[in-house]
Structure formats: structure tokens, C-alpha cells
């Protein structure tokens, strides 16, 4: 998956996990005045506002010392939510059978956006979907984002 934030993730993962939370992933979104650094955390009991504040405080301290982001930025710590982003192969494997929306960096079979049931992410780096009654294999390294589509019973 294409993120380019591996060094930032390597810096922040131990901080989040040291506080007892799962580091789900991060997004660094450039914006004109100040970039947005969004960190997603999770815990088996769920995430509260107090959890987000606790992680935010610790992460701010590390970012102030290490200064890995150029320019101004806003920090946001969040739960992954029902329509969570999937950042890793392991996260995708955890949600096999679920409906997902996939955005690619470049078109595959003429499309950059795919939607369907997540079937597999194999050892060769292919994400397999059942999309609109057809099986599709997408190169994992070409994926910009994968988002769960909540299913309401």
C-alpha cells in the first residue's frame, strides 16, 4: 500500500502501543496553511475522548522533540470508526468477507475505484475482491486506500 509515512509510523507506533492501544495507522494530509496528521488508534474496549487526549498528549511530546514534519501541522487522534481505513495486509486479513471501497494510485482495468467483498490478500501482494460479480486482483502496492463499508442489518 502506498503511504510514504513509514518513518513517521515507526516513530509513533511504540508511543501508542506503549500506552496500551493498537496503532491502526496514520494519514498525513498536506494542506495550504497546516498539514493534518491523523492517527487512528483502537482498543478492544473501544476508544473514548479521554483515550484520544492521552495519546495526543504523548504523541505531541515526541513530535516536538523529533520534529519529523516540515512546517505547521494539526494533530488529530481518532478511533478508526465503522468505515475504518485498512492500512496493512494483516488488517485486511482480519476483515475478510467484508465490503470495502478501494482507491488506486493508477487505473487497473480502466478504473481507479473498486468496491466489493474482500476475499484475500495473498503472499504475492495481490488484494482479491469480488466486485460486481467478477473476481478482481489488485496489486497491494498500488492501493492508496482501502475503507470498510459498514453493513447495516
Image (cartoon, rainbow, N blue to C red):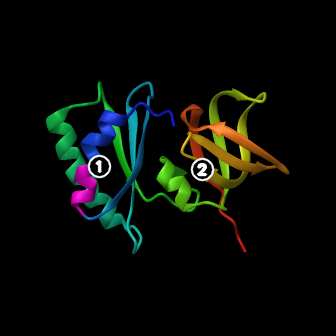
Mark 2, residue position: 147
Query: Quick check: 2 above or below 95?
Result: above
Q: Are marks 1 and 2 in contact (CB under 8 Å)?
A: no
62 to 108, vertically: above or below: below
| Front one among 67 and 124 | 124
Where are the magenta residues, as a range?
Answer: 14-19
**Dividing the picture into quarters, in which one does residue 6 lie?**
top left
Neighbour class for label 2 at 10 Å: few (<14), some, many (≥20)? Answer: some
The residue that appears at 66% across and 57% down in the rendered structure is 149
Q: Which residue is farthest right?
A: 133
Q: Magenta segment, principal secondary structure? A: helix
Residue at the image point whose x is 39% and y is 75% from the top: 45
Q: Looking at the image, can residue 84 be seen?
A: no
Q: Where 9 sits versus 80, above or below?
A: above
Q: Residue furthest front?
A: 123
Nearer the observer, 45 or 31: 45
Pick whichever of labels 1 and 2 is earlier in the sequence: 1
Residue 79 x/y as whole percent: 43, 59
Q: Does any portion of residue 67 appear in the rendered image?
A: yes
User: Quick check: 4 left or right of 120?
Assistant: left
Q: Residue at x 25, y 60 (%)?
A: 54
Tell me the number on the disc at residue 13: 1
Determine the secondary structure under disc 1.
Answer: helix
Task: Pinpoint residue 143: horizontal percent, then vertical percent.
Answer: 58, 36
Amino acid at each position: 500500500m502506498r503511504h510514504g509515512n513509514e518513518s513517521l509510523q515507526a516513530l509513533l507506533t511504540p508511543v501508542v502501543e506503549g500506552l496500551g492501544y493498537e496503532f491502526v495507522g496514520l494519514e498525513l494530509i498536506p494542506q495550504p496553511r497546516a498539514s493534518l496528521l491523523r492517527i487512528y488508534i483502537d482498543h478492544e474496549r473501544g476508544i473514548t475522548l479521554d483515550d484520544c487526549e492521552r495519546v495526543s498528549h504523548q504523541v505531541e511530546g515526541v513530535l516536538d522533540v523529533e520534529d519529523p514534519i516540515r512546517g505547521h501541522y494539526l494533530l488529530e487522534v481518532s478511533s478508526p470508526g465503522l468505515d475504518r481505513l485498512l492500512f496493512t495486509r494483516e488488517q485486511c486479513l482480519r476483515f475478510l468477507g467484508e465490503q470495502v471501497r478501494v482507491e488506486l494510485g493508477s487505473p487497473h482495468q480502466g478504473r481507479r475505484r473498486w468496491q466489493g467483498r474482500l476475499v484475500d490478500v495473498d503472499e504475492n501482494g495481490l488484494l482479491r475482491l469480488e466486485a460486481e460479480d467478477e473476481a478482481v486482483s489488485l496489486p497491494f502496492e498500488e492501493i492508496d486506500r482501502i475503507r470498510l463499508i459498514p453493513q447495516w442489518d
